[in-house]
Amino acid sequence: MSHLLDALNRNAERWLLLTFYVMLVATMFIEVMRREIFSYSSIWGEEIVRYSFIYLAWIGAAAAVKERGHIRIDVLMEYVGPKTKALLYIFGDIVMFVVAVIAFYWSLEAVLVSAKFGSVTHGLRVSQVWFLSAVPVGFGLVIFRLIQSFLRDINDFRNGRPVYEGDKLFD
């Protein structure tokens, strides 16, 4: 069981991103073929692509938080010591956590309202709750990854190790 949880911790976002990306590309390919060969397209294909892209964005945000790959201005980090750098990363995680909790709360409210009134999508005729849930699921994952990052940084700070800075996008 521990091995499974470790694998999920390392790869959950990757697997989800791969699933939604394949679904997006396959559906888009099928719809382009249908449109070009049969001069016919469906509304459900457009919806699947749109909602897959929304899930991709929010799960990708959690993956970026996990790897500290989100956009940041780190020129200041080159001029401060390791303790100050750790404190700045911890402060940034706290600010991001507060924003994520507020966004999670408000996005969950939209899901609950949709569930209450039973709204469905136009093409698929599926409950809109499944698709509106992308935002709270994404922010829930962001919150989870921020807690992990915060605990890792506190542990590194206490033990005098440099904090995890993630991969830089550009060098």
Image: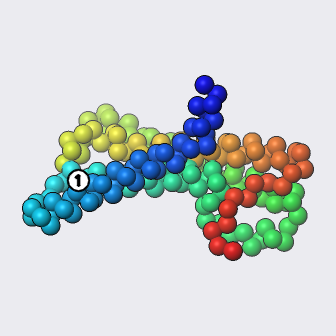
* Residue situated in front as seen by the camera: 133 or 25: 25
* Residue situated in front as seen by the camera: 47 or 103: 47
Q: Is residue 49 above or below residue 79?
A: above
Q: Position of residue 8 (x, y in %)?
A: 57, 37
Q: Position of residue 92 (x, y in %)?
A: 70, 56
Residue located 49% across and 45% down the image? 15
Q: Quadrant of residue 128?
A: top left
Mark 1 surroundings within 10 Å by alpha-carbon count, few (fewer than 14), some (14 through 19), many (20 or more):
some
Q: Is residue 129 above or below residue 34?
A: above
In the image: residue 45, left or right of residue 167: left
Residue located 34% across and 39% down the image? 129
Query: How many numbered circles are shown?
Result: 1
Residue located 83% across and 47% down the image? 156
Q: Quadrant of residue 78?
A: bottom right
In the image: residue 8, left or right of residue 119: right
Q: What quarter of the picture does the N terminus occupy? A: top right
Q: What quarter of the picture does the C terminus occupy? A: bottom right
Q: Visible in this render: residue 54?
A: no
Q: Visible in this render: residue 126?
A: yes
In the image: residue 87, left or right of residue 143: right
* Residue situated in front as seen by the camera: 169 or 38: 38
Residue located 62% across and 60% down the image? 69
In the image: residue 42, left or right of residue 50: left
Q: Position of residue 81 (x, y in %)?
A: 88, 64
Q: Kindly identify the amino acid type of the residue bearing the numbered disc 1.
A: Gly
Q: According to the image, label 1 marks what residue?
A: 45
Q: Quadrant of residue 167?
A: bottom right
Q: Position of residue 135 (x, y in %)?
A: 45, 47
Of helix, strand and loop, which one carries label 1?
helix
Q: How is the image coloured?
A: rainbow
